[in-house]
Amino acid sequence: MVSRVYVEKKPGFDVEARQLERELREILGVRGLERLRIVNRYDVEGISRELFRQCIPTVFSEPQSDVASTRRPAAGKGTAVFAVEFLPGQFDQRADSAAQCVQLISQGERPLVASAKLYYLEGGLSDADVAAVKDYVINPVEAREASLETRKTLRGSYPKPPMVQTLDGFRELGPDGLQAMIDDLGLAMDLADLGFCQEYFAGEKRDPTITEIRMIDTYWSDHCRHTTFGTELEDVRIDDEVVRAAFDRYLQMRHELGRDQKPLCLMDMGTIGAKWLKSRGILRNLDESEEINACTVKVKVDVDGNDEDWLFLFKNETHNHPTEIEPFGGAATCIGGAIRDPLSGRSYVYQAMRVTGAADPLVPVSQTLEGKLPQRKLVTTAAAGYSSYGNQIGLATGQVSELYHPGYVAKRMEIGAVVGATPASHVRRETPAPGDRIVLLGGRTGRDGIGGATGSSKAHNVESLAKDGAEVQKGNAPIERKLQRLFRREDACRLIKRCNDFGAGGVSVAIGELADGLLIDLDAVPKKYEGLDGTELAISESQERMAVALAPGDVDEFMGYAAEENLEATVVAEVTEERRLRMGWQGQTIVDVSRDFLDSNGAAKHQVVHVERQGRWAPSWEGTTPEERLRSVLRDLNVASNKGLSERFDSTIGAATVLMPFGGRTQLTPSMAMVAKLPVDGRTTSVSGMAWGFNPYLMSANQFAGAYLSVVESLCRLVAAGLRRQDAYLTFQEYFERLRDVPERWGKPVAALLGALMAQADLGVGAIGGKDSMSGSFEDLDVPPTLVSFATAVGKVDRVTSPELKRAGSKLLLVSPRYQADGVTPEPGSLLAALDFVQERIGWGEVLAASTSGYGCLAETLFKMAVGNQLGVLLDDGFAADELFRPAYGSFVLELGDSTFVPAGTGEFELRQIGSSCEDYVLGIEGGRIGLAPLQEEWEARLEPVFPYRAAGEEVETPSFDVARAGVTRPAPAVRLARPRVVIPVFPGNNCEYDSAQAFERAGAEVSTLVIRNLSPEDVAQSTEELVRQIGQSQIVMIPGGFSGGDEPDGSAKFITAFFRAPAVTEAVRDLLQARDGLMLGICNGFQALVKLGLVPYGDIRPMDEDCPTLTFNRIGRHQSRLVRTRVASNLSPWLANCEVGDVHTIAISHGEGRFVASDELLAQMAATGQVATQYVDEAGVPGMGLDVNPNGSVLAIEGITSPDGRIFGKMGHSERYTQGNFANVPGNHYQPLFEGGVEYFK
């Protein structure tokens, strides 16, 4: 029996509908649309009618904000109605979370749930208008139009798959037959590769199975085996003298390293720099092993004052093809895949950087090319996908940069770069021995992602959007979060001999790479649903899976740890003596190939190369006056503010963020690099930094100089942030057009890699990793030649420097290298001297702010330094305006105190004071003054139509509450304790438990974190029993932040509230609060749970009705992440006992549903009793409704409230995310003694 319910947001809560309505009118041009309604539909099978009715107001809707009905809402005359659902097999987080919530309430089996979204288009639209709307909201790669009729069952019909086919006659096929097979099967391999397979199977004296051909095609794909980069280059003809000299120098390096007989190829050019530097005594701290994970470096990390041996890992990943055709899932799995590489190295991944490439998103939708998604749709949906995944898994995104170039209309660029770290003692590396077991961890396997590796290795055409849907997946971030938790455990990691993540190629590659000999049992691979055949099981790229090699005696212990983290774990393979990869399915051996054949990577490839003469790049800024030219710079899409994009990404999770993405009191100056402390269990002064460099226009004109300057820019950004060149390492992202057999096209990556190689050799910094994507073509369109350099290093927090000007009256020092004949590329020796000078001055503590020049020249550099604190710049009379608008790669602008001595230059580089900072918000140049405020407005407004962030709030007077409790006795505990105990339940999707636990431990509490397990009804029952027991032994319950259940179904904290409403848990909470005078705290997701349980403001768990308050979607309609100011309005609560009324704290927020809504009567009552604890305020400490003050539009600017007695406190701001040294580039009081107040209550 299928039960159905329809849920629609009430007016005022219908943010999604109003936002899409505006898009359809203003962007799509459907002017006749009068009103849009969105209704969520849920179908449920496998539960009783009574349980279904119980779940309507708790799981599927909220009475405060929703209207729910078991009948489809009526449509008025002339209203068009259609429904949309995900394609079968695509992950539906809304339906999955709903099913889990229902299970928590029932304590039984998990039901089947299906969700859909209904759109009501009011206004008598034409058929063409309705069709246009459907095309806009339905991406056929991921979704389809759904039936409006009721369903009899949700159970899929999965016919038994046939046995795997043997390709009879394969060995006898001629060239035409082989080519026909390539075309019929859509193989990525070429005729030479398939001919090579034919020779192999002739030697095996049998024909292959279709599984073997599909698996080999995946194994040898450009995505997995870098086939293009491994192609041997012959007859390299170079027209450009500079490139020819670099090529000769490269050949000399090969000779010095004894590599003359090795194939000359792009891979050799990309990797020889590190080998050459290592031979010269540089790069001595590399951690090298047989594992193929992420770049790994040995470092010393300060933990509570003691240096420990750690491994520092980093990786960059692209998902260009998947994101181009399904931007949400493609971008989400980009960051998911990037995380899993260093995670498989047993590190905890703690910070990420996103660098993307797009065409102009402001171009009208009507100009979209056939077979393409609109650029606006691509950039906004990809941002939503990446941020959704990163935010859920709990990964701080330290920088978000999107580059715009018309060439990226061919194919989008989507890069995620991540850093991770782990104590060296946690990592065991051994070669798996015969008899060892392979355990598959994490997600189940489905058809999603089949063909992703081969698809990413092809050029694409107008049919790709419709044909390639199975290659793209939806990520399930909460599962990967569980993997992160497991791999942070020393006891679990020390059992792992070798590990590999499931990325491209699925089982065949992830498990196939773990050992030379393997027997894989595909019948043991956990499936999302029945009906998968052996080939699908072998090559599906379903996300969130890991393969680990274990000694037989360690399997049970390891699987026990996995169970404690709520993870599925299954033995699926065994290591064998013979060097062959075998796979069995349904009693049939469907793969049996030799390791040597697989590792051959196919037929040898050869290619002639022609590097053409390189061009020159000189930016041209419109205008004749300095002000007009500056305006042209600031309105350029590659210079304009992208804050509206960046704020979608959680930048502070992990309580380790040293530099916020934007600095200054306005939080508008972009940081040069992302910097965070390493993820230690304790205190540390050790930080990592990462910076990127790349200019698509420069590289389009000159691939050699462009790649060289990508390295220069990334390294200079890193040094400007306070890291040292000598500690730096590089990793590259290459992205080029489909090269085909055209020598001139091959010349572009050759020139680029030689440029990057020369930069490594000149600067003494090596690239020890990288990722290549050589399929950036669509029909006759190509992406710009792309080599993005990422520079990273480990350093100390006291050296970290930010670029925003700190005060008026400072000296501004320009440090510039000499330049080569092209006027753009620095002379190597001069640049090294300049870098060392900047490092030295930063180390001496003389530098207040530091920035380096890039795409927008010194004009961009000085403006962005000024905007953060709205200080002006007065340039000396001798400084010519033209200098502002010339490329200045390798140059630095340093802010020095007014009394700091400026040394004379040595002649190795230019060193001169060019001016000073001033109070007036102007740029003084050539005797005139340019007001910066109007230019700032244009700079901020440029991308706001696509990424809004300054939407106005309601213009209403917001009172400031002052309820001090001096002289009034606060509630006191029944028992005094020196060290109270805190229990923190960790629900699937929570991600703030580490930060919260450490905050309590620093305050003197004893902390227990309890993972709530729900893989089976027994797990749910045991978790309930254990939480009840731990609440009984604790004095404080904290519900941490995160995205429990992915903030689904269509609302936050439903997963948590479902669990706490279990009678036993409810009674344990009441005993804690009412009988034992205990405390509760909820931050962000925890606050949402407290409100929706009734614990705040009522003080007890109670049923919800339409008059109860709630926390709902931010008024801006998206996630918000930044620092905000909050003011203590009442110190009634023990949690705020160490605060004074009127104290203002600058605190991290990161949420999508933080808008507090309550009735006027309840608000008045809360204000009178001092339950309004904290409010969002401006710089003057005044509450407000504008989004610059109140990030979510919360009524009365409320940030936090308490129960009537103050012992339960809920707030949106993440007080736990500050530790000493964090948020260094944003002024304010970041320390809120919240946890100390709670702990001291018991003393």
Image (tube, helix red, strand yellow):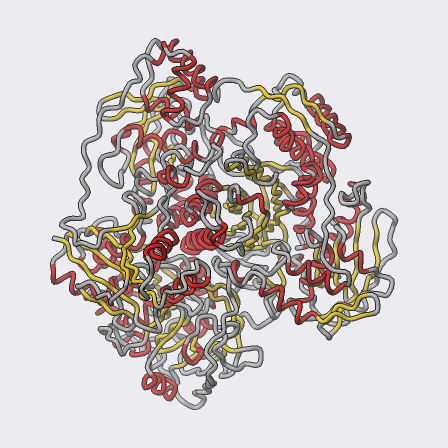
Q: Nearer the viewer, residue 668 or 34?
A: 34
**Relative vertical location of residue 945 with respect to residue 457 in this rendering, above or below:** below
Instruction: Give the mark count.
Output: 0
Examine the image and state in which quarter residue 1160 appears: bottom left
**Could you tell me which quadrant the C terminus lies in?**
bottom left
In this rendering, position of residue 176 left or right of residue 147 = right
| Residue at x 45%, y 17% (from the top left corner) | 596
**Relative vertical location of residue 252 with respect to residue 873 in this rendering, above or below:** above
Q: Nearer the viewer, residue 312 or 1115?
A: 1115
Instruction: List x then y, in percent, for residue 604.
Output: 53, 18
Examine the image and state in which quarter residue 105 appears: bottom left
Instruction: List x then y, in percent, for residue 1033.
Output: 29, 65
In this rendering, position of residue 1161 left or right of residue 883 = left
| Residue at x 73%, y 75% (from the top left corner) | 920
In this rendering, position of residue 120 left or right of residue 969 = left
**Relative vertical location of residue 75 with respect to residue 771 in this rendering, above or below:** below
**Relative vertical location of residue 69 with respect to residue 378 in this rendering, above or below:** below
Q: Nearer the viewer, residue 771 or 946?
A: 946
| Residue at x 33%, y 17% (from the top left corner) | 208
Can the viewer see residue 722 in this picture? yes
Instruction: List x then y, in percent, for residue 582.
Output: 33, 22
Instruction: List x then y, in percent, for residue 437.
Output: 33, 30
Q: Kindly give the residue lying farthest to the bottom in the view shown.
A: 967
Can the viewer see residue 499 in this picture? no
Q: Nearer the viewer, residue 470 or 619?
A: 619
